[in-house]
Image: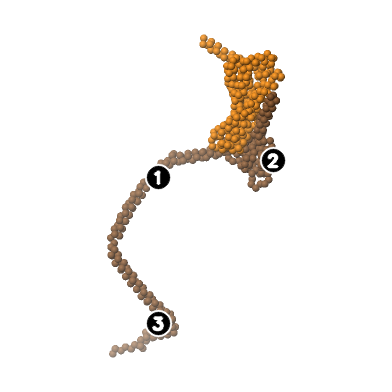
Amino acid sequence: MKRRDEVLVGLLLIVSVAVGVAGTVWLARGGLSSGYDMYARFPWGAGLKNGQPVLLAGVNIGFVKGVKLDPNGTLVVTLAINNEYQVPSQTTAAVEPNGIFGDQLIALTPTRSVTTFMAKGDTIPVGKGTPTTGDLLSKADSIALDVESITAAVRDEFVSGGGIADLRKVTGEMAALVAELGQIASAQSRELTITQQKLRATLAAVDSAVVDSTMRSIRTSTANVAAITEELQHAQGQVRSMLTKLDNGTGTAGKLLNDPTVYARLDSLLMRLDSLAIDVKANPRRYINLRVF
Amino acid sequence: MPIAATWRTLHKGASAVLREFGEHGYYLRDIVRSARETDTWPRETIRQMRVIGVESVLLTIIVAGFLGGVTAFQTRFQLFPGVQLSAVGLIARQSIVLELGPLLTALVLTGRVGARMTAEIGTMRVTEQIDALETLAYDPVAFLSLPRVLAAVIMLPALVMLANVAALVSAWLTLVLATDVRTVDFVEGLRISFIPFQVIYSLIKATCFGAAIAFVCSYQGYIAQAGAEGVGKATARAVVITSVAILTLDAIVAAVFAPFVQA
C-alpha cells in the first residue's frame, strides 16, 4: 500500500513538472529545437512584446522571442524563426499594426526574384512599415483641420460677406425671369394656337372640286410642256444637223463658212468695192450723170 | 452606560480576534517544531499526498476543463468586430494561468480535501484519539497536521499545473470546434507577452493556497468541540475561513507579484 502511494504520488509529480516545463518552454521558445534566431533593430517605442508574430510575406514563420532595450535609442529584437523557413536576402523588417487596438507584429518583406538567403543569426535591415493607427489618426486630424478651415472660409464668404444674401437676390431674380419667360411662353402658345386654328380653318375651306380642276389643269399644262419639250428637242436636232453641215462645209452656207476661197473672193470684192466707193466719192460724175432735162 | 457596553463588546471582539491569531500562531509553531519528529511525519506525508493530490486529479481536470472552455467561449463572444482573434488566446491564457486556474482549483479542493481534513481530525479530537496519541508519546501535530500541510503545499502546485494545461487544452478545443478562432490564432495569442514567471506566479499562488487549506482546515479539526455537531460546525467554519483566506492570499500575492508578471 505504501509503495503504491509513493508510486502514484511520484508519477503525479513527475507528470505535473514535465507538463509545466514543457508547456512553459513551448510557449516561451516555441519548443526545444524548433527554430533559430534572427535579429532586427527598431527605434524605441515600437510597441513590441514577446510572442508577437513574425510574418514573411504574410506567412507566420515565427514570433518575437526577446526585446532588449539598447541605450542608443534602438530596441534589439530577437526573432525566433521556424526551421522550415529561411529569410531571403534583401528582406526588410517593419513593425506593423496587428488589428486596430494597438497590437503589433513584425512583417518581413522580401524582394522579388532573389534566390539567396540570409544566414541564421543575421540582423534583418529595417524597412518602411505600413501606416500605424497613430499615423492614420494624425492624417485624419490634418484632414479635419483642413475641413474646418474650409468651413470657416465658406462661413466668412457666405455669412459674413453677404454671399447668402446675394444668392437669395439672384434666386429671386431668377424666379422673376422664369415667371417672365413663362408669360412669354404662354403668349406664344396662345399665338400658336390661334395660328393653328386658322390653318385648320383654311384647310377646311379648301374645296376639293377646285383642287381637282387645278390638278387637271396642272396635268394638262404638264402635257403641253412635254409636247413643247418634244418639239424643242426636234428643233434642236435640226439645228444640230444644220450645224453639222455647216461644220462639214456642205451646202452653200457651209461653203460660205468653211471655204477660204470664198473668203478671199469676198475680201477682194470688198476691197474693190472700197476702192470703187472711194473712187465714186472722188469722181462722182464719172459714175453718176444726172440730167433732169 | 452605552459607551461602556460598546467598549466591552469591542474589547471582547478584539480579544477574540487576537486570541484566534495567537492560537493560530501557536499551532504554526507546533507544526514547525513537529518537523523534528522525522519518524512520524514522512510516511504519513506520502499518504496525504495521495489523498490530496492523486485522488483529486480527476476532479481538478474536470473543473479546469469546464473552466477553460467557458472562459475561452465567453471571451470570444465578448470581442467586438475588429479585434484580432489571437486576443482570445492571450486573454484565456492570462485568465487561466494567472488567476482562475490556481483560485478555482484551490476553492474546489477546499471542499473536497479541506472539509475532509477537518472532519477527520475533528472526529479524532472528539473521540479522544488525539489524546490517545499524546498518551502514546506521539506528537499529534507531527502525525496529523504537518503531513497534511506538507502534502498540500507540494500537491497543490502539481494539481494547478495540470489544471492550467487542462484548461488551456479545453479552451483550444472549444475555440477550434465551436467558434471561428483557428489554432494559429490561439497559439499566437498564447505566446503574446508570455514570460515563464507567469507560470511561477501561478505556482506561488498554488503553494500559498495549499498551505492555507491544510493549515486552516487541520487547525479547525484540531480544535473541534465535542460531539457530531462540533465536528460539523468545525467543518463548515474551516471551509468558510479557508475560502476567505484563499481570496485574501490571492489579493496579497497579486499585489506583491503582479508587477513582475508583465512581459
Indicate the position of residue B163 as horizontal and vertical percent values: 62, 29
Question: Marks 2 and 1: in contact by CB < 8 Å?
Answer: no
Residue at left offset 59%, top offset 19%:
B235
SS class, disc 2: loop
Q: Residue B112: which quarter of the image?
A: top right
| Chain letter for the part of the structure drawn in orange | B
Is residue A146 left or right of B105 when viewed as pictured? left
Indicate the position of residue B79 as horizontal and vertical percent values: 55, 34
Q: Nearest the camera: A242 or B62?
A: B62
Residue at left offset 33%, top offset 53%:
A188
For disc 1, the marked residue is A170
Q: Nearest the camera: A275 or B5?
A: B5
Cα gap from disc 1 to disc 2, whole angstroms = 76 Å
For disc 2, the marked residue is A120
Q: For marks 2 and 3, give the one nearer the viewer.
A: 2
Chain A's colour is: brown
**Do the residues marked 1 and 2 share a common chain?**
yes
Whether A250 is drawn above or below A115: the answer is: below
